[in-house]
Image: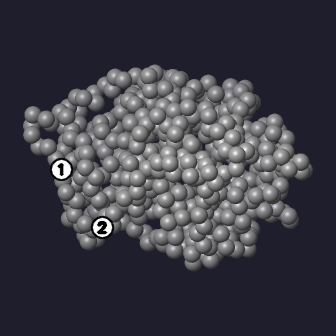
């Protein structure tokens, strides 16, 4: 969705129309804009594109052999058996315990102001996820390859439709709170901290908790992110227990089960790597954003199937994953699960974790390479925020077959040059993302959405805002300067992306192309962009 507001643009940006219903009789029902207004001067890259029709898909099918088409129809390329180690036993072996329901468990996101503090019980007392799904995601590769198997796939019918005070007058605000957010961001840029505290106090009084329409909830999270910069605090804390890790895994699984975003991003990246490494049995992937590692399950299965069809030797897969310092527990889970899955597929597998701070100093010297292996690199906006673009100049020494970039953070993924622009771009992107989730019959502002927003979306918002306010080189320019050229993804990848979206029961998602990028769009707004680059 677009953000309707008017501000004085100190950066000569285009003025945005405000569309606010100021009738006191309707104050209890915040207006939700329906029109699409451009925040920037240029139009959306896919505004004029229509969703790919079935006839186009049929044309693509015609270019695939009968045997391949039959395989696609059976979805052998992406099916996976979730016969991995039981989550509970794995947690016990690793010494992890889900104590999220224990007394005193804390929420990650609450308003930092004492006057605007959300009752922690609102988060700590959230019930465990029940079974929900808006499309048959079990037909595609799961994002967690068996993690938390007790958390079932979700269906809209099982959601609690009561949304508490969503329809109450708790949000007695018009869209001028967006103006206030913009002014708060500008205070950070001009170092007007005293004025910023005054604006923040007003926002804290009016935005006490993340409820309401998508734009309202997105605004709350951006307010929290800006407040962290103004006060020097960090609303995200990592407890000594494993509760937050377990809750994050659960939230990511729910997110993947109701939205095609996770599967689209992992599938397109995997397919780009498979296309570039066709025929290789010794594969080394450098993953700069491994997450929970679930996307490598389908990749392993594909390697095993290709090796069996060629009657060749056992495939060898090495993964070098760059992780932050605090990723110790997650890395143990990733190693255990991927190793178990590789064993079942009869794949020789090795994974090495490299700390990002170590990579910042040593670049690719911190990664072990072997003779005879083909290398692929997967990057995301997060690594450029941590390590900058300098390491791209060292890529040529690694001689990768392909560099795949997956962007699931929108315009603010690489950090904006100003806090103001980060808020403008971020509100648009994340309110659109939340809107797409609600369209899956998800109870807006309910407990399931709160989990996703708290453990999945807000950390990205916080990191994106904190990375703003500095000069950044556009990614495309940085990649070209490093000697890379963009190449298109295969027709096979496009066809399978269409197959994935046909499983989605929500109208509004479609696949589009922007130059050589493959996009997953919600109506006319891109949510995921995958591109492949080679020397």
Q: Residue at x 23, y 37 (%)?
A: 171
Horizontal and vertical percent position of residue 369: 80, 63
Which comes before the other along the chain, label 1 or label 2? 1
Q: Residue at x 71, y 27 (%)?
A: 86
Residue labelled with disc 1? 19
Task: Classify residue 70 as left or right of residue 230.
Answer: right
Q: Which mark is residue 345?
A: none
- Tell me if mark 1 has few (under 14), some (14-19) or many (20+) residues whose alpha carbon lies within 10 angstroms of its own: some
Viewer-side residue, 306 vs 73: 73
Horizontal and vertical percent position of residue 176: 20, 50
Task: Check the image and report above or below for 151 versus 498.
Answer: above
Q: Residue at x 33, y 26 (%)?
A: 163
Task: Classify residue 57 as left or right of residue 205.
Answer: right
Horizontal and vertical percent position of residue 15: 22, 63
Position of the C terminus, as image quadrant, is bottom right
Viewer-side residue, 433 vs 280: 280
Horizontal and vertical percent position of residue 132: 50, 26
Residue labelled with disc 2? 41
- Tell me if mark 2 has few (under 14), some (14-19) or many (20+) residues whose alpha carbon lies within 10 angstroms of its own: few
Q: For residue 196, what is the image quadrant?
A: bottom left
Q: Residue at x 75, y 62 (%)?
A: 375
């Amino acid at each position: 969705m677009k953000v309707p507001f008017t501000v004085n643009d100190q950066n000569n940006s285009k003025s945005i129309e405000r569309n606010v219903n100021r009738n006191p009789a309707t104050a209890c029902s915040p207006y939700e804009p329906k029109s699409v207004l451009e925040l920037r001067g240029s139009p959306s890259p896919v505004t004029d594109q229509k969703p790919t029709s079935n006839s186009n898909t049929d044309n693509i099918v015609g270019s695939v052999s009968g045997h391949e088409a039959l395989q696609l129809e059976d979805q052998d390329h992406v099916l996976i058996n979730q016969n991995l180690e039981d989550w509970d036993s794995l947690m016990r072996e690793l010494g992890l315990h889900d104590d999220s329901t224990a007394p005193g468990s804390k929420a990650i996101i609450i308003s930092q102001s004492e006057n605007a503090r959300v009752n922690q019980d609102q988060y700590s007392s959230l019930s465990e996820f029940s079974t929900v799904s808006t499309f048959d995601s079990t037909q595609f590769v799961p994002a967690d390859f068996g993690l938390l198997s007790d958390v079932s796939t979700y269906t809209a019918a099982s959601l609690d439709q009561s949304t508490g005070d969503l329809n109450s007058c708790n949000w007695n605000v018009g869209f001028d709170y967006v103006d206030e957010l913009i002014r708060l961001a500008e205070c950070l840029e001009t170092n007007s901290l005293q004025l910023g505290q005054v604006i923040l106090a007003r926002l804290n009084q009016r935005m006490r908790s993340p409820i309401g329409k998508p734009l309202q909830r997105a605004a709350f999270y951006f307010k929290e992110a800006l407040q962290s910069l103004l006060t020097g605090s960090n609303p995200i804390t990592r407890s000594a227990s494993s509760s937050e890790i377990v809750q994050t895994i659960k939230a990511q699984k729910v997110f993947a089960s109701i939205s095609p975003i996770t599967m689209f991003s992992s599938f397109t990246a995997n397919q780009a790597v498979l296309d570039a490494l066709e025929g290789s049995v010794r594969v080394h992937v450098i993953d700069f954003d491994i997450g929970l590692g679930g996307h490598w399950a389908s990749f392993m299965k594909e390697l095993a199937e290709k090796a069996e069809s060629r009657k060749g030797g056992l495939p060898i897969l090495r993964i070098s994953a760059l992780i932050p310092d605090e990723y110790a527990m997650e890395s143990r889970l990733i190693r255990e699960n991927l190793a178990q899955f590789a064993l079942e597929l009869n794949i020789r597998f090795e994974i090495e974790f490299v700390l990002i701070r170590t990579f910042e100093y040593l670049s690719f010297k911190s990664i072990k390479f072997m003779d005879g292996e083909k290398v692929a690199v997967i990057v995301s906006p997060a690594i450029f925020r941590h390590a900058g673009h300098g390491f791209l100049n060292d890529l040529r020494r690694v001689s990768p077959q392909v560099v795949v970039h997956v962007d699931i953070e929108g315009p603010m993924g690489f950090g904006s040059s100003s806090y103001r622009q980060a808020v403008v771009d971020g509100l648009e992107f994340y309110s659109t993302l939340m809107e797409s989730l609600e369209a899956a019959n998800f109870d807006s502002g309910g407990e399931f959405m709160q989990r996703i927003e708290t453990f999945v979306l807000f950390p990205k918002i916080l990191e994106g805002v904190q990375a703003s306010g500095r000069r950044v080189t556009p990614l495309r320019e940085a990649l070209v300067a490093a000697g890379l050229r963009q190449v298109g993804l295969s027709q096979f990848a496009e066809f399978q992306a269409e197959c994935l979206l046909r499983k989605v029961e929500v109208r509004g998602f479609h696949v589009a192309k922007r130059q050589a990028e493959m996009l997953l769009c919600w109506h006319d707004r891109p949510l995921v962009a995958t591109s492949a680059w080679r020397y």
